[in-house]
Every structure is written in structure tokens, then in C-alpha cells.
Amino acid sequence: MRTHIATLSATLLALATVSAHIQKTPTVETAERMSGTWTINRDLSPSFRPSGRSGGRAGGIAYAIGGLVPQRGGRSNAGPDSPSAAGDLTPTERAERSAMQQVDQIAATMTIKATEDTFSVVDPRGELTCAIDGRTAKLAMFGATVSTKCHWNKQALQQEFSTTRSKLTRTWSLDESGHLVVKTRTEGFGERAVEAAAVYDRSSPRSE
């Protein structure tokens, strides 16, 4: 009898373990579906325009929100009377502005590696990884220090990038057709907030 009870207990424990592995949380499923290589769908992303070649050794075409394409010398299309015009910025703020203009750009093709706890984007500029814990971390990127934060908002991954005078919020989600939707909201000191969405097609099958 004791042998049968021990065998039954071991079987139930094994079944419980298998069931725990089979049942995935919604964020785990979303992370798995987001992972893979994606290419921008220009027809479905009218707000984003080519802004030249992105940085990094590999190069590659980058896209920016129309009207916010960086100009020579690191200036944006802010008017000359804007408080954030380049001439009114300190050297640190100019470096931050240039860095945020790089962050604002998105690559034509990117690879996402996502889990419930981390989110990584690989494009021609390199790889950017953030811990999905809602905590602010300071990262050195594009010649400046940028504060970053990542967290799940239901089945969407939300990234925040901020400096002294600006903030960019990027939300990653999947639509009903399986497209990757990347929404960007930029806010600058003395400038109106701008929002736009880019849509990506999957260009490689996700790993199971």
C-alpha cells in the first residue's frame, strides 16, 4: 500500500510540474510572439520617413517621425524662438538632445529578443537591452547619459527614455493580424508632444 501511495504522489507531482511548464502567463506568450526579426511596413507607417543611414559600423537605413528628422549639427526642426533651440542649450544638453534624436530613430529591420523579464532590440547600431522591472537605470548611449525604464502594461511593453529636457515613450505591441506595432511619443521642453506609430512585418519565424 505504501508503495502505491508513494508512486501516486510521485505521479501527481510530475503532472503538476508539467502543467506549470505548459501554462504560460500572457506576458510570456507576448514576449515569445514578439521575439524574431521584423521589417518596417512603409505603407502602414506613413508618419515615419527615411532619415538617412543610422549610426554603427553596419550602417542601415533609419526612420524618424516626419518633421523630427535631425538636421546637420544636431538641430531638430524646432523653431529659433523655442527654449530648446540648440543655441540655448549647455554642452551636456546638446549631447542629450543629439542622443535622443538617435533614440527617436527606428531601424528598417530589427531583431527582438524578449522574455518576461528582459527586452532586447538588435539593429545596425547594436543591441539595447533593458530589464523589465519598472526601475530607472542610467545608460550611456550616443554620447550622453539617458535614463531608461521598461515595464509591461498588460500585453504591451513600454519603454521610457528621458534626459534633462526631453522624454520619449515607446510602446511595443502586437495587433490582431500579427504585426508588430511600435508607438512613439516624444515630449520636449517648450515643444508640443508628438505621437506616431510604425508597423512591422515579421521577416523570420519566431523560435518555438
Image (tube, rainbow, N blue to C red):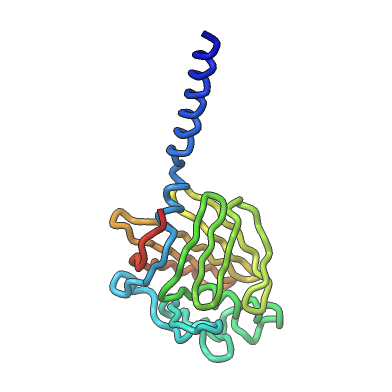
x%, y% of residue 24? Answer: 45, 41
x%, y% of residue 45? Answer: 34, 71
Q: Residue at x 57, y 80 (%)?
A: 82
Asked if residue 76 can be seen in this view, the reply is no
The residue lying toward the viewer, choosing from 165 and 156, is 156
Q: Is residue 144 above or below residue 9?
A: below
Res. 33 image quadrant: bottom left
Q: Residue at x 46, y 67 (%)?
A: 111
Relative to 111, 94 lies left or right: right
x%, y% of residue 165? Answer: 63, 71
Q: Is residue 71 above or below residue 18?
A: below
Q: Residue at x 43, y 78 (%)?
A: 63
Q: Is residue 157 above or below residue 71?
A: above
Q: Residue at x 67, y 67 (%)?
A: 139
x%, y% of residue 160? Answer: 56, 61
Which residue is the extreme one toward the top? 1
The residue lying toward the viewer, choosing from 113 and 157, is 113
